[in-house]
Every structure is written in C-alpha cells, then in structure tokens.
Image (cartoon, rainbow, N blue to C red):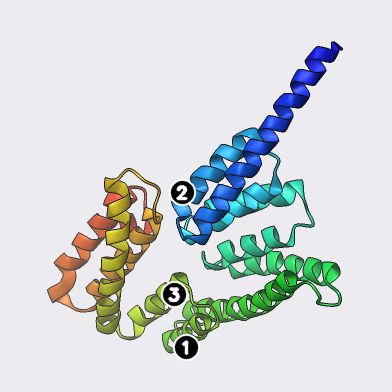
Amino acid sequence: IDPEVQLGDLETQQRNATLVQKLKTEGNAAYQCRKYAEAVQHYNKALKFDIWNATLHCNRAAAYLMLSYFDKCLTDCQAAVHVDPSYAKAHFRAGKALLLQYQPRAARRYYHTALQLVRQQNPDRSNAELTGMEEKIDTDLKAVTFVEQCRATADQGKWADALHYAELAGESIKEDAMQQLRLWALTYVDPVMARVELGHMVSITQKQVDKALTNNELGINPLILSDQLTLLGRASFFSGHLYVSAAAQRLKEALKYTPDHKEATQLL
C-alpha cells in the first residue's frame, strides 16, 4: 500500500472525526435550547460521516422523541443498541418510545434491560447520570403497569376503571401521550367533557404542525395531530346527533394531515 495513500486516508479520517464532533456539539447545543428539529439536522449531517456512531443515533433518538416521531426514535435506539448492546440510555429511550405508543409489553422489555445495565454499570450508585436514569426507569415502569391496566379494563368495557388507570399513568409521567390516553378513556365516560378538552389540545397541536408545514420544516409529527383529531371526531360523535357533522369534519382533517390514517378512515 502506498504510504502517501495511507497518510491521505488518515488525514481524511481525522478531518471527518473533527467534523463529526463539531456537528455533535452543535446538535447537543440545539437540543439543550429545545430546538429539536435543528438538532436532528446536525445529527443527520454527522451520521453521514460516522453511521456506526451509537451516541449520534441515541442523541438523534432523543430529538425525535421530543418531536413525537416515536417510530424514528425507536429505529435510532435499535441502531445504537446494534452497535453497542450495553448502551443503557438507548434501551431506556426505546422503552420510552414504545410506552408513548401504548405498547407496554415491548416497552417493559427495553426498560428491564436498561435497568439491568444501569445496575451493572453503577453498582455503588456513584454515577449521578446513571442513578438518575435508574430513578426515571422505575417511574416509567409504574406508568407501563398503569397503561397495561388501562388497556385491559378498556377491553372489558370498564371505562371508568380505564380512565382511573390512565390518570395514574399521567400522574407518573407528564407526557402529552398520557394526557391523550386519559382523554381516550374519558371519551367513553364523558364524551362532552372529552370533546371540550380535546378541542383545546388540538388547537395547540394544530398551530405547531401548521407552522412547521408552512415553513417546510421538521416539527411536531403530524400523525399526533391526526390521532387527536380522530379522537375528537369520536368524542363529537358520542356527544349526540348535533355533533355528527362536526365529527365528520374532524375525521376529514385528520386524513388531510395523515392520508393513510387507518382509524380515521374506518370511522369516516
């Protein structure tokens, strides 16, 4: 091998490594400023030069999580775990992404793996970051149990009980997805109240989504808005015949943002 070629390759690798570190730092700074779309862009650029960087995948997963792109978050976490199976934070974020999609069994598996890794890597609890993660995992696992109980009682038609467990899940972790779960159960207990609360939630989310779409930027996942509009359509329908046309309008709006939304299509 030509020594000059080797030297050129080494210099290129060093430049790329420097660039990756710079882009990672910029992504982290954007994330800390809650500029999650900007953070994703920085991590995207960095990953073009270092696709096997587990930290970059996990950091981008965190940004995707904040934008409610749960599938993308999970994919990045799985990529990070593929590179580094002992990466506790990647397992933890994968569990969070699944929990916020109401998949408690799959979430529990990732959380348990994360918890096992954290305890192995921090047996004396001297690492503040890992100790904090362990506490978050314990809290999230409580929410996992409540989501499981919510779904189980809903399947039995016990909607008051489902609402109770959804409220407990929301008290465990302050996430919009848990609030949405509560409103889903409330739709079957008190559709009028659910319709009012959902109307407020949709108004906030719609402004965020429309702003990003108008500016052709990455923003809150439009699927989340479609889910909320579909739930609002269901609550409107359950509110009585005076709201049937409003229900149909909400479902049409849901399909505007997510044309292949299955539930909205079925209800319409």
Residue at x 22% of width, y 79% of height: 239
| Amino acid type for the residue under numbered disc 2 | Glu
Residue at x 51% of width, y 82% of height: 153
Of pointers 3 and 1, the one earlier in the residue sequence: 1
| Amino acid type for the residue under numbered disc 3 | Leu
Q: Are marks 3 and 1 in contact (CB under 8 Å)?
A: no
Establish if 26 lies above or below 136: above
Q: Which residue is mark 2?
A: 38
Q: Is residue 245 visible?
A: yes
Q: Position of residue 172 (x, y in %)?
A: 55, 82
Q: Residues within 10 Å of mark 1 (few under 14, many from 20)?
A: some
Q: Position of residue 138 (x, y in %)?
A: 68, 79
Residue at x 24% of width, y 79% of height: 196
The answer to which image quadrant residue 182 occupies is: bottom left
In this rendering, the label closer to the viewer, 1 or 2: 2
Q: Which residue is mark 1?
A: 164
Of pointers 1 and 2, the one earlier in the residue sequence: 2
| Amino acid type for the residue under numbered disc 1 | His
Q: Which residue is mark 3?
A: 181
Q: Is residue 268 visible?
A: no
Mark 2 vs mark 3, CA separation in Å: 29 Å
Determine whether, in the image, residue 233 is placed left or right of residue 189: left
Front position in the image: 58 or 244? 58
